[in-house]
Image (cartoon, rainbow, N blue to C red):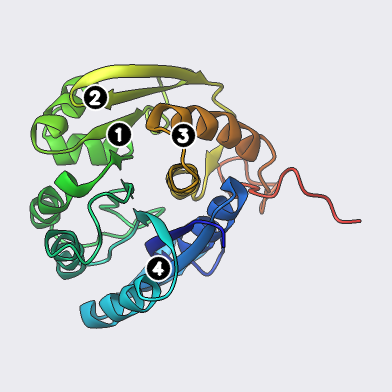
Amino acid sequence: MRPVVLCFSGLDPSGGAGLQADIEAIGASGAHAAIACTAITVQNSQQVYGFEACSTELVKKQAMAVLDDLPVRAIKSGMLASTDIIEMMADLFAQKIISTDIPYVLDPVLVANSGGSLGDKDTLVQAFQKLMPYATLLTPNTHELRALSGEEDLHIGAQKLCTQGANAVLVKTSHDFDSGDIDQYLYVKGEMVYHSVINRLAGEFHGSGCTLASYLAGRLAMGDELIAAVQAADNWIAKVLAAADVPHPEDPKAQLIPNRFFNYSCP
């Protein structure tokens, strides 16, 4: 069987982000996605209207069912929906129910896509600090990086997170819209080891962060080293966003949906 990535993520009815993005991106990477659903959201491609977190016990039972059955070779988490679920994940690693030898991509979602708070920021940050030491890679957006580190400077923030236990941090400037093209910097143990520049396309994209993190997890499950996985994800995401679907062509401010099947055409 293909290597499996176990994803902890929420349902997005629009299909642009969340567990659908995980499934499509991981499939494109060559791996197989298994999902522990953490929340049901009410959202479309433009806005979040609300969400309901799954119970911590239900999320854990979903994960255990997968771990007992499939060859899990990587873990990815996105919207964890509550501090209880974040702490439960940390316990799975601490108790070695999930092996710490398995690559883990942590996309530290503090706010639901397109808006919608997941709770008190300080409480969420404290919970994530318990989980970060188990992550092979953190993939925060700029807002999340600044919130988690308490630093305005992205580079200082990434280095600080490494001192707090994170193995590696991928710095992305995609949410800094006045920064020109998108720069990505990979810090490993506080040292910058990789820098890339991605052409900034017009418009905003719904689910681009989920998509990138999940593809990275898939490549790690397939056996790529970290830098190689980031390089492959850079090349792939640029094509995915360039081919994005446009739900509202008449509205230039509307969000676009990444086309994770850009290289597939129906017969």
Residue marked by disc 3: 229
The reply to whether dot 2 and dot 1 touch (C-beta < 8 Å) is: yes
- The numbered mark, 2 or 1, whose residue comes first in the sequence reads 1
| Between 170 and 74, the one nearer to me in the picture | 74
On the image, the x and y values in percent for residue 130 come to: 10, 52
Mark 2: which amino acid? Leu
Residue marked by disc 2: 154
Residue at figure coordinates x 63%, y 46% from the top left: 251
Q: Label 3 to label 2, Cα distance in Å?
A: 22 Å
**Quadrant location, the N terminus:** bottom right
Residue marked by disc 4: 49
Q: Which of the two discs, 3 and 4, sits closer to the camera?
A: 3
The reply to whether dot 1 and dot 3 touch (C-beta < 8 Å) is: no
Residue at figure coordinates x 11%, y 34% from the top left: 150
Is 266 left, or right, of 184 in this rendering? right
Residue 142, disc: 1
Q: Which of the two discs, 1 and 3, sits closer to the camera?
A: 3
The reply to whether dot 3 and dot 2 touch (C-beta < 8 Å) is: no
Q: Label 1 to label 4, Cα distance in Å?
A: 23 Å
Q: Label 1 to label 3, Cα distance in Å?
A: 21 Å
Identify the element where label 2 is drawn. Answer: helix
Mark 4: which amino acid? Tyr
- The numbered mark, 3 or 2, whose residue comes first in the sequence reads 2
- The numbered mark, 3 or 4, whose residue comes first in the sequence reads 4
- The numbered mark, 1 or 4, whose residue comes first in the sequence reads 4
Q: Label 2 to label 4, Cα distance in Å?
A: 30 Å
Residue that lies at the very extreme toward the right in this rendered image: 267
